[in-house]
Image: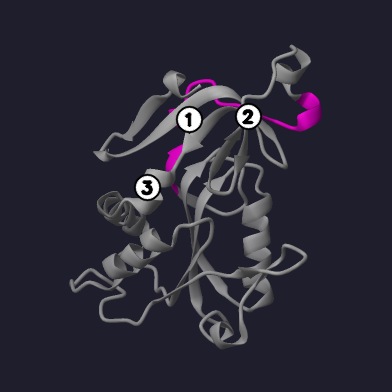
Amino acid sequence: MESRAFTVSLTKNPMISTNVIPGHFTTSHFHTNYYVDLDKLKTNVLVAKDVAEELALPYLKNTIVDTIVCIEGTEVIGAYLAEKLIREGTAMINSGRDIHVVTPKSNVNRQLTFQHNIQKIIFNKNVILLVSSISSGITLNSALECLSYYGGVLVGVSALFNAYPDKQEYNVNSLFTSKDISGYQLFSPGECTMCKGGRKLDAIIVHDGYIRM
């Protein structure tokens, strides 16, 4: 399966790239014909620094930021993003500010929550939500509901990969989208054309990778 992989690179910075594997994959919410591997972007320090540089661009001049909320393993990028936003410069609106980088917890009902000591840096604070990928939208909506419940003021959503760049209620600043992968598709399990054609699953996509079938 891995032998079918190909690389998609960011045009303006080829150092930022993702491996894409074609196949038949499932999550708990959908089926897809591609697995987009974002691990290197989140775990390689030099690459994460470049990723943060790109993700910072929409916020540098006009967006006051107090807190960056990271989900799906994006904490390394979040820390670098904060560093980019607070650096010195006449056009840098967040120069010298304190920016906090936090991650919500998941309770027994799989709802995202913030511990009591963290809630004060969410309530009435300008928040960027940083996510790994947006596909079905379920994780994104859960995070947005969490921020709303704790009184955060959403000033931006950033994602490494966005499967539906034209269909979100909120503007999402994305590194890669489904438009970068020719023929990328998502299916609800009952409508998957690969299942209907008798094609077996290659793997189950999980939080930090995939499990081969």
Q: Looking at the image, is mark 3 or mark 1 nearer the viewer?
A: 3
Question: Range of the magenta residues?
Answer: 174-191
**Quadrant location of the C terminus in the rendered image:** top right
- In the image: residue 109, left or right of residue 25: right
Provide the residue designation for mark 3. 41
Q: Secondary structure at mark 1?
A: helix
- The residue shown at (58%, 83%) is 119
- Which residue is pictured at 72% across the width and 42% down the height? 28
Residue 116: horizontal and vertical position, in percent?
Answer: 61, 86
- Give the residue at x 40% y 52%: 42
Question: Residue 106: image x %, image y %?
Answer: 66, 67
Percent x, y of residue 161: 48, 43
Q: Residues within 10 Å of mark 2 (few under 14, many from 20)?
A: many
Whole-angstrom CA distance, mark 3 to mark 2, is 21 Å
The residues tagged by marks 3 and 1 sit, at their Cα atoms, a distance apart of 19 Å
Please tell me which of labels 3 and 2 falls first in the chain: 2
Q: Which residue is mark 2?
A: 32
Q: Is residue 96 left or right of residue 106?
A: left
SS for dot 3: helix
Q: Closer to the camera, 209 or 72? A: 209
Q: Nearer the viewer, residue 193 or 123?
A: 193
Q: Which residue lies under the disc numbered 1?
A: 179
For badge 1, the amino acid type reads Lys
